Image (cartoon, grey):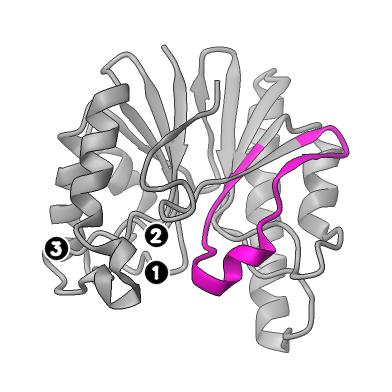
């Protein structure tokens, strides 16, 4: 019963958004993800998917991509990315499939761990506007809501899923890293970064928290084992 992670699947089975426009390494990326997934993951395992699931704008299209994930082995715990415009009512999402859990102001469990999270947002840095500040503050509230629910139910071992990196391009501490440290989170899974932005990967141990970058092109479209 292992725990794996991947993010930024950017599926587009019904949205006509081929990913190879972003480079040859994205050619047939869905086939590569599937091959790697079924090679190592069984129905007893759990996989965390930290956002940017589908390019679809509406749930009618997005469900085609969700069905593709549903047919893959294992239990899936999913958080929202900045491109997941298809994402609708959290209650409706969590009633779609018995093997897929969606995080929004809630949490799910893996063995004795609570899996919490939110989408996140770019922390204050070189490019930061009033609009960014509004979303950033909202996402901090959502992260606390998720963490508080886990703590209130007695969970001490916590993994957090974010889509955005929790630090800016200078790797400075942020309100996100402060919250993660306050709640003594053990591991943080995130994605969002691609191409030239991969020079801003923040990974490894920092103030007793392990940060793990899981954008699928960064991990060669191959889910990484977390536990």
Q: Is residue 127 left or right of residue 198?
A: right
Task: Give whichever of discs 3 and 2 has the lower sequence position.
Answer: 2
- Quarter location, residue 137: bottom right
Instruction: Give the residue at mark 1.
Output: 83
Relative horizontal placement of residue 163, taking residue 174 as reference (left or right): left
Name the residue tied to disc 3.
Answer: 60
Where 169 sits versus 7, above or below?
below
Q: Which residue is mark 2?
A: 52
> Disc 1 to disc 2, how far (Cα)?
5 Å
The residue at 74%/33% (across/down) is 185
Residue 32 appears at what percent x and percent y? 24, 46
* Dot 1 and dot 2 residues touching (CB under 8 Å): yes
In what element is the residue under mark 2? loop
Residue positioned 67% across, 33% down in the render: 187
Residue 8 in the figure: left or right of residue 37:
right
Task: Locate the N terminus by quadrant.
Answer: top left
Numbered range of the magenta stretch: 188-209
Where residue 51 appears, as percent x and y from the top left, is 44, 54
Q: Residues within 10 Å of mark 3 (few under 14, many from 20)?
A: few
């Amino acid at each position: 019963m292992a725990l794996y992670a991947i993010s930024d699947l950017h599926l587009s089975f019904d949205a006509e958004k081929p990913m190879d426009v972003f480079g040859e390494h994205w050619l047939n990326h869905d086939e590569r993800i599937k091959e790697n997934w079924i090679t190592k993951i069984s129905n007893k395992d759990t996989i965390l998917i930290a956002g940017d699931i589908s390019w679809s704008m509406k749930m009618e299209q997005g469900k085609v991509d969700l069905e593709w994930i549903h047919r893959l082995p294992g239990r899936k715990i999913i958080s929202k990315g900045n491109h997941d415009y298809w994402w609708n009512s959290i209650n409706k999402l969590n009633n779609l499939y018995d093997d897929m859990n969606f995080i929004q102001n809630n949490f799910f469990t893996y063995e004795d761990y609570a899996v919490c999270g939110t989408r996140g947002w770019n922390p204050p840095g070189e490019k930061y506007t009033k609009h960014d500040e509004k979303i950033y503050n909202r996402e901090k509230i959502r992260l606390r809501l998720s963490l508080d629910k886990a703590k209130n139910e007695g969970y001490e071992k916590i993994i957090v899923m974010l889509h955005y990196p929790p630090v800016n391009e200078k790797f400075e501490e942020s309100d996100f890293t402060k919250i993660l440290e306050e709640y003594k989170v053990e591991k943080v899974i995130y994605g969002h970064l691609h191409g030239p932005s991969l020079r801003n990967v923040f990974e490894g141990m920092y103030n007793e928290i392990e940060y793990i970058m899981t954008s699928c092109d960064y991990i060669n479209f191959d889910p990484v084992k977390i536990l």
